[in-house]
Image (cartoon, rainbow, N blue to C red):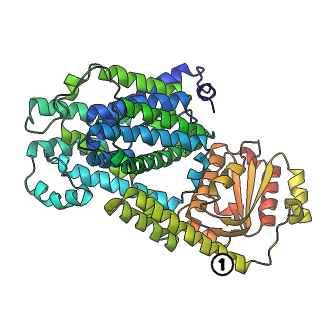
Amino acid sequence: MQITSIASGLRFDNLRGDLFGGVTAAIIALPLALAFGVASGAGPMAGLYGAIFVGFFASLFGGTATQVSGPTGPMTVVMAIVITQYAHEPALAFTVVMMGGLFQILFGVLRLGNLISLVPFTVVSGFMSGIGVIIIILQLGPLVGHAAPQGGIMAAVLALPDFYAHPNWHALAVGGLTVAMVYLMPKRISRILPAPLLALVVGSVLVLLVLNDAPVLGDIPTGAPTPHLPTLEWAALPQMLSSALVLSLLGSIDTLLTSLVADSMTRTLHKPNRELIAQGIGNMAAGLFGGIPGAGATMRTVVNIRSGGKTGLSGIIHALLLLAIILGLGPLASTIPHAVLAGILIKVGVDIIDWRYMTHIRYAPRPGVAIMFLVFGLTVFVDLILAVGVGMVAASLLFVKRMADLQIAHTHARNVSLEALLHEEEAKILARHAGHVILYHLSGPVSFGGAKGMMQGLALGNGHKVVVVDFSDVTLIDTSGAFAVEDLLHRAHAGNQHVLLAGLKPQGRKVMEGLGILKPVPREHIFNTRLEAIRYAGDMVVSGEVEKPAA
């Protein structure tokens, strides 16, 4: 794949929207990049350099037009571990970042991007929630004026009683104000001036004028970043490759999950392998110039899309604006309190936790819940990559067992074509209303392995107003499959289409009801049989109800 062919996706037909989207994303990115840089141990400017280089190259060459990339919570947690490992020679840490970028390029060239979607939802949920908890715990010390101790998460937990028994009251005041601002600021104000940026300004002014004892960032270098050539220690090479692989895998998962969010908002499909190559180029550049690694950033991507960004130009504008800011930022950034950045990161950590799954956990399938908590515990207390690996193995073994059980139970089943499947009345109704009604017949398990492929196969943008989804031959629906159905409902609603569900078995219905998937579906749009649903769809067309907005 040639770099020129990748960059050809850049367009200039949405200049106004991309300009506004890029500027807004940069305003959001500034305080977060500073905070992530400090949290990583590489310093605030390293966070900004990461936002600039990853943001620029990922947008220039990327496969998700609206995605804005930069330092993220998960990548920062891993980078903090890397910085600690190579404290004796910091250049090695940034060489690891470059190596991680090279791995990502290799993933894209080998077309491994599509395999990322095979990571089960419960594994991702446990991992991301664990990352969120790590960020929160590590920032509780700086919030009250104490530096996070060396020794990882357990050292931070053990130090908390002493930290809070002897707080720096000035730091606590400004940190508490920051947390209050990022949580309580009215939306009408935060749309104009993002809460993290306003907290950054207000906190810095308070420390400068009143709360002088709160620790601040101190002297920060200014000027354009300078390149640093890769450094290797042959004795450390195996560990460096291992750390780089962790960064690349996590960055790839983080990025492509954000790409899926962008797809759902823009009703487009990203190019995963192109996106991985672009992220790899960005991370190699970030490591070369002393920046921390990054990935697709969900918050900045959502803000970009809502502000009008539609092409990679918005991400490039975001990066160039940050570059312009850092050329004179040093004297101002030196007065930023650590407690303010800690307050911002605590909000980031809370947002990373998968609350949607947590709130429905009582009704989710028990094996999936067990895997989620297993991955969560390993992420927080043991090792990040081990957590994902163990979760994948556990989920795969569970899936194999389920499929073996179903194979034994359904050995009499056989595949049939859709035409042979339909009864005479069903076929006549569908033929009569072919331009308005379409039937999708699903069979077998709807699980983490096939959920994404199933969703991409249901082409909703073809003019049909009523979509009948037949679950009569579906043998299993797991958590990932249920959320895939939810995505279908959202896409249909956005396209003003009505969705009728037919033939849901008790197992699948229980899972989807427990997770809240069926709440937005009117009761009259759920049928026991496919024939009932098709009859109802025909009646909707005859009565003119299909012209009304979907419920």
Residue at the front extreme, as displayed: 234
Instruction: Name the amino acid type tagged 1.
Output: Asp
Pick the quarter of the image with the N terminus. top right
Give the camera-side residue of 58 and 235.
Answer: 235
Q: Which residue is mark 1?
A: 405
Tell me which corner region of the image, top left, top right, bottom left or bottom right, holds residue 377.
Answer: bottom left
Residue at the bottom extreme, as displayed: 409
As drawn, is 474 to the left or to the right of 170?
right
Image position of 271 with respect to 126: above or below:
above
Give the camera-side residue of 323 and 183.
Answer: 323
Tell me which corner region of the image, top left, top right, bottom left or bottom right, holds residue 521.
Answer: bottom right
SS under mark 1:
helix
Q: Position of residue 81 (x, y in %)?
A: 31, 49
Image position of 416 with respect to 298: above or below:
below
Can the viewer see residue 307 in this picture?
no
Image position of 546 with respect to 340: above or below:
below
Can the viewer see residue 530 in this picture?
yes
